[in-house]
């Protein structure tokens, strides 16, 4: 709860109501913020009403100020609603553009679901946070969506698997899906099953393609673990080909800000 100004006092709900004052319950941000501003401007005392745990329930302000603010709220309701709608459309378009910039091949159905989940109002989900840049928000939103909707993560949690262990167990699949969505079709030898890697040798020569040869010498931290077992670490990177070894490094990054929602 924000600290009270000199012109505000904290009271309990059952405290006597001052003469010519009106209780304004919390919930309507426009009304609450404007009665506070106008009460301060008038030099009157604003009473913050709290419960026994000191959680705010609303405010008490002069009745005349409350009437002025509610009248203004009704007069501007349509224009304010239009502004909110336009702002929401702009936010969604910006988020969608960033998803497509990073994940060019994301299926349209998945794109629509990512936008719906990440930008849900009052959900406290990553798409609505103001503490991250757009690039990071998109990465975390896509990462969470793939984990929940394109891996056995939900099934593992329901089966009693620890959350951290479940994340490690689906990490390989998460990387595969994310890599396919970036539009990068290249694979390193370390990313491919053994039989598939053998098939990449040049026909009739018995020699491996020199462009792929260096992939076998990648540091072990870049090697994706087999799907049958958990990865050694959740800090691994995916190498999808030359020049993009850091493109999906966010997948194994810090999980503290990750969005773990149930679709």
Image (cartoon, grey):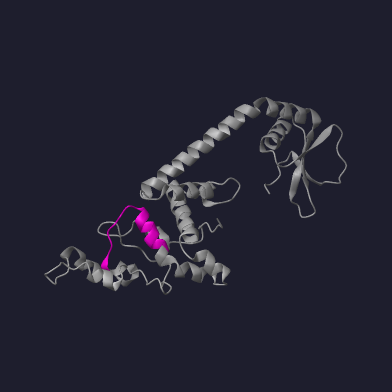
Picture quarter containing residue 53? bottom right
Picture quarter containing residue 202? bottom left
Would residue 130 be seen by someone viewing this image from the given angle?
A: no
Q: Residue at x 48, y 56 (%)?
A: 145
Classify 225 as above or below 55: below
Would residue 170 be seen by someone viewing this image from the given angle?
A: yes
Q: Position of residue 8 (x, y in %)?
A: 75, 41
Q: Is 3 displayed left or right of 106 in the figure?
A: right
Q: Position of residue 236 (x, y in %)?
A: 38, 66
Q: Position of residue 243 (x, y in %)?
A: 26, 56
Residue 186 is covered by the magenta coloring: yes
Q: Is 100 displayed left or right of 50 in the figure?
A: left
Q: Residue at x 35, y 56 (%)?
A: 180
Q: Position of residue 226 (x, y in %)?
A: 37, 72
Picture quarter containing residue 240? bottom left
Picture quarter with the C terminus: bottom right
Q: Which stretch is magenta? A: 174-189
Q: Is 192 displayed left or right of 62 in the figure?
A: left
Residue 260 is covered by the magenta coloring: no
- Point out the residue furthest to the left here: 205
Q: Residue at x 41, y 50 (%)?
A: 107
Q: Residue at x 76, y 46 (%)?
A: 57
Q: How many marks?
A: 0
- Point out the residue furthest to the front here: 204
Classify 172 as above or below 73: below
- Point out the residue furthest to the top here: 75
């Amino acid at each position: 709860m924000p600290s009270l100004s000199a012109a505000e006092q904290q009271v309990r709900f059952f405290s006597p109501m001052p003469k010519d004052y009106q209780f304004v319950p919390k919930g309507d941000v426009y009304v609450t913020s404007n009665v506070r501003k106008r009460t301060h401007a008038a030099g009157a005392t604003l009473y913050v009403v709290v419960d026994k745990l000191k959680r705010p329930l609303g405010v008490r302000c002069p009745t005349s100020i409350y009437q002025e603010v509610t009248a203004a709220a009704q007069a501007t309701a349509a224009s304010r609603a239009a502004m909110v709608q336009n702002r929401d459309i702009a936010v969604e378009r910006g988020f969608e553009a960033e998803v497509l910039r990073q994940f060019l091949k994301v299926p349209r159905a998945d794109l629509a679901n990512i936008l719906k989940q990440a930008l849900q109002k009052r959900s406290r989900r990553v798409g609505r946070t103001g503490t991250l840049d757009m690039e990071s928000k998109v990465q975390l939103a896509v990462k969470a969506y793939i984990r929940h909707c394109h891996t056995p993560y939900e099934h593992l949690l329901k089966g009693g698997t620890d959350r951290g262990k479940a994340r490690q167990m689906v990490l390989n699949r998460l990387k595969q899906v994310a890599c396919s969505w970036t539009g990068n079709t290249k694979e390193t030898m370390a990313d491919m099953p053994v039989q598939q890697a053998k098939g990449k040798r040049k026909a009739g020569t018995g020699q491996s393609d020199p462009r792929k040869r260096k992939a076998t010498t990648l540091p072990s931290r870049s090697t994706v673990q087999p799907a049958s077992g958990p990865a050694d670490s959740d800090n691994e990177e995916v190498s999808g080909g030359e020049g993009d070894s850091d493109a999906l490094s966010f997948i194994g990054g810090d999980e503290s800000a990750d969005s773990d929602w149930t679709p």
